Amino acid sequence: MDRLGSFSSDPSDKPPCRGCSSYLMEPYIKCAECGPPPFFLCLQCFTRGFEYKKHQSDHTYEIMTSDFPVLDPSWTAQEEMALLEAVMDCGFGNWQDVANQMCTKTKEECEKHYMKHFINNPLFASTLLNLKQAEEAKTADTAIPFHSADDPPRPTFDSLLSRDMAGYMPARADFIEEFDNYAEWDLRDIDFVEDDSDILHALKMAVVDIYHSRLKERQRRKKIIRDHGLINLRKFQLMERRYPKEVQDLYETMRRFARIVGPVEHDKFIESHALEFELRREIKRLQEYRTAGITNFCSARTYDHLKKTREEERLKRTMLSEVLQYIQDSSACQQWLRRQADIDSGLTPPIPMASNSGRRSAPPLNLTGLPGTEKLNEKEKELCQMVRLVPGAYLEYKSALLNECNKQGGLRLAQARALIKIDVNKTRKIYDFLIREGYITKA
């Protein structure tokens, strides 16, 4: 019996013969008693009575072919699929190219057959209409799922999250400390009585009007904060950092005009300038390629690789000037050599040493007799000496960082700098030391 097996015009898309492993050409044989997977044989292996494992030569079989009409007696199934593939490759309306790809039909035959059976066929039109109606009915009958809103965060007072949100309380949609927070104090002693003189009554009304204007200013500022998403300052800063440095400078300059144009228009303005910057940078890169005589992207990749290699070699050559800088001070030279030895051996240097360009570094702090020194281990003493930090202050900073790390599950350098109001370089050294010693973990 004849069965429709494969419509593809490419022989490599058909399964291989299990006998000779060659690509099957129609017609071919499918064993009805073997499988899965299906067992296919070409006509040559079938006539030789090929047998393999469970397959026997006396099994029932099916003849797989697409040489039979489907929609038109003069068109086989193979030609129908070839027509559809040609229309997809050449485009609707390019009937001469479609006929050239098919090779078995003329331009007029291809156009007439496609328009009759695939465009103006009422069977296909009614089928599509039924599918569309079924989809609409399914959408109309389906209930809209309801998901309860997430519980808003309730940060504790004076916590890091509360400070990041500027004291905003999401559950109340209000701030702990409002703008012009003491505006109501001017009204606490005002009392309207009947025996007030006209001047005193007018004065009290003027105070009330001033209070109303201060309330309007408070509401205006809160609306700007909500509309522009400025409540979570850290999230706002992260969104700002996704732009290049030049666009960030423009963002900072145009921020004062954001309250005038509105949040959507302001974001569109910044995004358009970011796109312009990217286009200008890409044009400059292409101009650099053209100046170097590069005319294809393959050569451009080679050029970028060589340019990066040259830059790395140039940075290596600058190390000599760094050595000459340290060699003037014998103690600094010894520290530099130890640091380079640690780097070469794969170890992390304990304390990154600062550059002595232009001035002498301060001597290490003497911890003898300072309170809290007995509570430090040797590495902590060395850290306090290098950063010139008294033990009591170090223990206080360490405790604050440990508590915040336990609350948040991790700590970033920016959070550490927000907690410790000292020199940022000292904060970095303390943060790196606590990370390296395992007291805290990075967020």
Image (cartoon, helix red, strand yellow):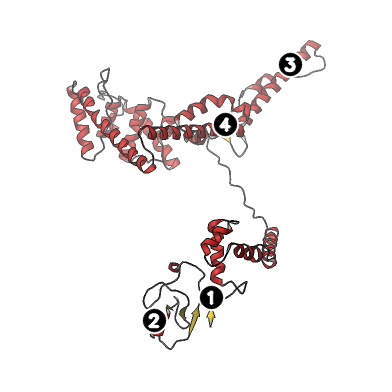
Contact check, label 2 and label 1, Cβ < 8 Å: no
Front tag of 2 and 1: 1
Q: Mark 1 or mark 4, which has the lower sequence index?
A: 1
Q: Amino acid at mark 3?
A: Ala
Q: Quadrant of residue 408?
A: top left
Is residue 355 at least partly visible in the picture? yes
Residue hosting label 1:
67
Q: Amino acid at mark 2?
A: Cys
Residue 50's label in the rendered image is none
Q: Mark 4 or mark 3, which has the lower sequence index?
A: 3
- x and y percent of residue 391 in the render? 31, 28
Q: Mark 3 or mark 1, which has the lower sequence index?
A: 1
Compared with 313, 83 (above or below) is below
- x and y percent of residue 188 in the render? 69, 21
Q: Mark 2 or mark 1, which has the lower sequence index?
A: 2
Front tag of 2 and 3: 2
